[in-house]
Image: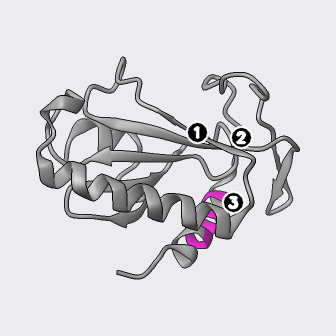
Amino acid sequence: MNATLKKFGYPTTLIRDYSHWCVLLRPGQVTLASLILAIKGEEMSFSGLGPEAFAELGRAVKDIEQSLKAFRSYDRINYLMLMMVDPHVHFHVLPRYVAHQEFNSQQFVDAGWPGPPDLKSANAMSNETQLLLLQSLKQRWPKE
């Protein structure tokens, strides 16, 4: 497990564990159901990934989009590979919504809509809501 996975709450926030990748619930919910798609290894450049990791990436992305659509119909989806603070290969996966979303009686606002996502405007989320969201996404994830 690399430091980037730890920073984003692994294993507590784990939704799905693949051979080369992990999908985590992003602790700071920029938009409802924001995720992290992170490599499990120590690679710090996208070009440094092996062919097996690239092949599995397609499956992970398909599962992400299928699961998020089953959870809540988003209007757009953004995959951001920033790696400025957290150096291991990872994406911030942000479903984007025109309208504010509500989950477990909490409002989730996409502060950047219709422009680029505002990563500094994470929606506050109680521990109870985080756990319910994690469970809800896991239930909608495709079976292996």
In this rendering, position of residue 60 left or right of residue 21 = right
Residue count near mark 1 (Cα–Cα under 10 Å), binned few <14, some 14–19, many ≥20: some
Tell me the SS state at disc 1: loop
Q: Earlier in the sequence, mark 1 or mark 2?
A: 1
Q: Which span of residues is magenta-colored?
A: 129-136
Give me the disc on residue 124: 2
Q: Is residue 130 magenta?
A: yes
Q: Amino acid at mark 1?
A: Gly
Tell me the SS state at disc 3: helix
Tell me the SS state at disc 2: loop
Residue highlighted by disc 3:
129
Residue highlighted by disc 1:
28
Residue drawn at x 11%, y 45% as measured from the top left: 50
Residue drawn at x 60%, y 26% as measured from the top left: 119
Residue 46 position, x and y percent, is 23, 31
Residue 48 position, x and y percent, is 13, 32
